[in-house]
Image (spheres, rainbow, N blue to C red):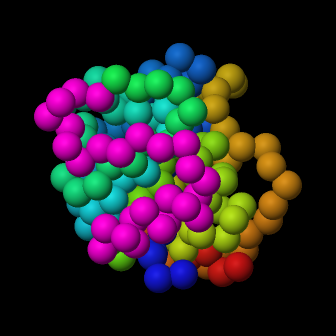
Amino acid sequence: MSINVAVYMHVSINGMIARLDNSDFSSELARSDFLKTIKRYKVNVIGRNTFNTASKSNGFPLDGLNIVVTKHGIKLKKEWKNVIVTDKKPKEIIKIIESRGYKNAMVAGGKLATSFLKEGLVNEIYLNVEPIVFGKGIPIFANENFEKNLRLLQVKKFSKNEVRLHYKVLN
């Protein structure tokens, strides 16, 4: 695989990436780190739920290529020239990215990240661990039958309560 694919997610202590209402729980420092990191990757691959949340912010779409993966219709603004909506599978999405000359991509969203990880397309995982626990929410990876071994590359401390873990996917 010639594309380096990373997953970056904010996660609660108990493994949730979003509340059921998709309200944000990540800190300003964590959001800033995400934006710095995604700028290095130049390609942002997100699912419908992540798109619905991101499109409400001033920071969307990000510079570079933005791919929204969904089977549902999405209204795009005319000025969003760098946004592609597709219902293609992860390997086909990699081909789209390669055909446009990109070497790196960042994937966000639980179900989408799971599908890329399950197909062996993810090289790195960034987890920003937030100091919060809530009972009902969207888990970091969808309940699928797969297993991956990881090697810790870096621990970055944002504050006295918050860290980012950076892993390499080994298999």
114 versus 68 height, above or below: below
55 versus 85 height, above or below: above
| Relative image position of residue 66 (x, y in whole percent) | 33, 49
- The span picked out in magenta is 76-101
Outermost residue to the left: 79
Q: Residue at x 41, y 40 (%)?
A: 85
> Horizontally, is 154 left or right of 143 in the view?
left
Quarter occupied by residue 98: bottom left
> Horizontally, is 68 left or right of 17 in the view?
left
| Relative image position of residue 105 (x, y in whole percent) | 40, 64
The magenta stretch spans residue 97 = yes
Quadrant (top left/top right/bottom left/bottom right) for the C terminus? bottom right
The magenta stretch spans residue 150 = no
Q: Residue at x 49, y 66 (%)?
A: 94
In the rendered image, is residue 108 in sight? yes
| Relative image position of residue 2 (x, y in whole percent) | 47, 82
Residue sitting nearer the eye, 38 or 164 = 38
Count of marks, rendered view: 0
> Horizontally, is 84 left or right of 150 in the view?
left
| Relative image position of residue 50 (x, y in whole percent) | 45, 35
Q: Residue at x 47, y 25 (%)?
A: 73
Residue sitting nearer the eye, 161 or 143 = 143
In the rendered image, is residue 37 in sight? no
Residue sitting nearer the eye, 68 or 12 = 68
102 versus 55 height, above or below: below
Outermost residue to the right: 145
Quadrant (top left/top right/bottom left/bottom right) for the N terminus? bottom right
Q: Residue at x 54, y 74 (%)?
A: 123
> Horizontally, is 59 left or right of 8 in the view?
left
